[in-house]
Image: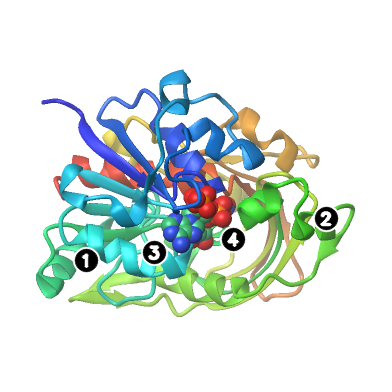
Amino acid sequence: MGKQRVIVIGATGAAGQNVVESLANHPWFELSALAASSRSAGMTYEKAIEDARFFEKTPGNEVLAMKVIDVEKASPRDYDLAFSALPSEVANVQEPRFAEHVPVISTASAYRYEPDVPILLPDVNPKHAKLIKTQKEKRGWEGFICPGPNCTTVGLVVSLKPLIDAYGVRAIHVVSEQSLSGAGEKGLRLDSTYRKSVEMNVLPYIEGEEGKVEKETNKILGRLSGDGIKEAGIIVGATCTRVHVQTVHTEAVYVDTKKPCSAEEAKETMRSYVNEAQKLKLPSMPEKTIKVFDEPEMPQPKLHRQYGGDVTLVGRLRKDPVFKNGLAYIVTSDNLDKGAGGGAVQSAEYLKAMKYF
Ligand SMILES: NC(=O)c1ccc[n+]([C@@H]2O[C@H](COP(=O)([O-])OP(=O)(O)OC[C@H]3O[C@@H](n4cnc5c(N)ncnc54)[C@H](OP(=O)(O)O)[C@@H]3O)[C@@H](O)[C@H]2O)c1
C-alpha cells in the first residue's frame, strides 16, 4: 500500500512547521499539500515562513519549494488525512469542512471540549480514541476531528498519569513558565511587539491558558464511560506565565496523591511507566516517554531537545509539605514537538495502527 496523502492546514505557523518537520520522511504519510491563509497562498513555503522560521532540521528543498495553497480553496477529497494547526476561530470552520470527508488531527482547541471529541495523547489516554466512533455516527462524517491537548497541559498529564494509576491524585497546583514559541508567530517574529514585551521579562498572565489546563487535565485523565468521558475529578489550580525562553515549557507541579508515596517510589513509578500504545512500536513514539533525573540541575528548557522533543523530562522530584501526601517536581515538555506537531503525528500513527482510518 502506498503512503497516505496528507495536507497540513496552518502549515506556516509555529505548530504547523513542527507538523511538517515531524512528517519528513515518514514511512506511512506523504506531504501532499501545505495550506495557510490567503496572505501566504501562492508563495513558496520557504518564502511564506521566512519571517518566523522555526525549523530545527530543514524539511528538505522539495518541501521548501512547495507552493502554499489557500485553506479555503483546498478540497478535502484530494487527501487521505489532514493535520490542522490553525488558530481556533479558523479551525472552528475549516476542521468540520475537512472532517466530513477525512480524519483531521488537530493542534487547535476549537473542538477539544465537545463531549464526542477525545483530547488524545496515545501514551496517556489511548482508550479515549473510541469516542471517534460515536463522533462519526452522531455527526454523519466520513472522517473525524481528533485534537491533542493545549501545549501546557501535555507535560503535566504525561507526568501525572503514572502517579494516578499507582496512587490516585486528589489535587494539583501547577505554575508554568511558557516559552515564546508557544505564542506562535507573534512570539517568534523578532520585531513583534509581543516578543519585545517578554524580552528579559516574565509576563504573569496568558489569556485563556489557566482555564484550558484545568479543564483539559480532568478530561484527559478521566475515563471513557458510555458515549462520553467521566472527568477525573482532580482539583486543579494553574498559574500560567510567559518567560523569555525560545521553546520548551517548564512547569513546577505540586501534587497531593490519595495514597502516600515516597519521592523514590514516585520516581520509579514514572520511570517504569509504559502503556499499550507505546508497546505498538509506532514510528514516532519512543519506548519511554518520561525521563526522570536525579541531578538537581535538570531538567532545563535549553537542554531539553538533547533528549528528544517527544520525551517529557522530570526532575527535582521531592516530598512537599503543603499537601497531606505532597510531592513536588519540575517538568519540561517541548511545546512544539510533543505539544503540537510531534504529538499530532503520534496520534495519527496510533489511530492508523488501530484502524480508525
Ligand atoms: N505554538 C504552540 O506551541 C502550540 C502548541 C499546541 C497547540 N497550538 C495551537 O496550534 C494552532 C496554531 O498555533 P501557532 O502557534 O502555530 O499559531 P501561528 O504561528 O500564529 O500560525 C497560525 C497558522 O494559521 C494560519 N492562519 C491564520 N489565520 C488564517 C486564516 N484566516 N485562514 C487560514 N489560515 C490562517 C497562518 O497562516 P499565515 O502564515 O498565512 O497567516 C498560520 O499557518 C493554534 O490553535 C494553537 O492554539 C500551538
Sort mark 4 into few (<14), some (14-19) or many (20+) by Cα contacts within 10 Å: some
Q: CA distance from mark 1 to mark 4?
A: 33 Å
Q: CA distance from mark 3 to mark 2?
A: 28 Å
Instruction: Tell me the number on the disc at residue 261.
Output: 4
Sort mark 2 into few (<14), some (14-19) or many (20+) by Cα contacts within 10 Å: some
The quarter of the displayed image where residue 95 is located: bottom left
Instruction: Tell me the number on the disc at residue 196.
Output: 2
The quarter of the displayed image where residue 329 is located: bottom right
Q: Amino acid at mark 4?
A: Cys
| Residue positioned most to the right | 200
* Residue displayed at 77% across by 70% down: 321
Q: Is mark 4 within 8 Å of ligand 1?
A: no
**Which residue is denoted by mark 3 in the rendering?**
91
Q: Earlier in the sequence, mark 3 or mark 2?
A: 3
Q: Earlier in the sequence, mark 4 or mark 3?
A: 3
**Which residue is denoted by mark 1 in the rendering?**
131
Q: CA distance from mark 2 to mark 1?
A: 42 Å
Q: CA distance from mark 2 to mark 4?
A: 44 Å
Q: Is mark 3 within 8 Å of ligand 1?
A: yes
Q: Is residue 179 left or right of residue 88?
A: right
Question: What is the secondary structure assignment of the residue under circle 4?
Answer: loop
Q: Is residue 237 above or below residue 315?
A: below
Which of the two discs, 2 and 1, sits closer to the camera? 2
Q: Position of residue 137 (x, y in %)?
A: 10, 70
Compare residues 1 and 162 and report the one nearer the observer: 1
Please identify the quadrant where the N terminus is shown.
top left
Sort mark 3 into few (<14), some (14-19) or many (20+) by Cα contacts within 10 Å: many
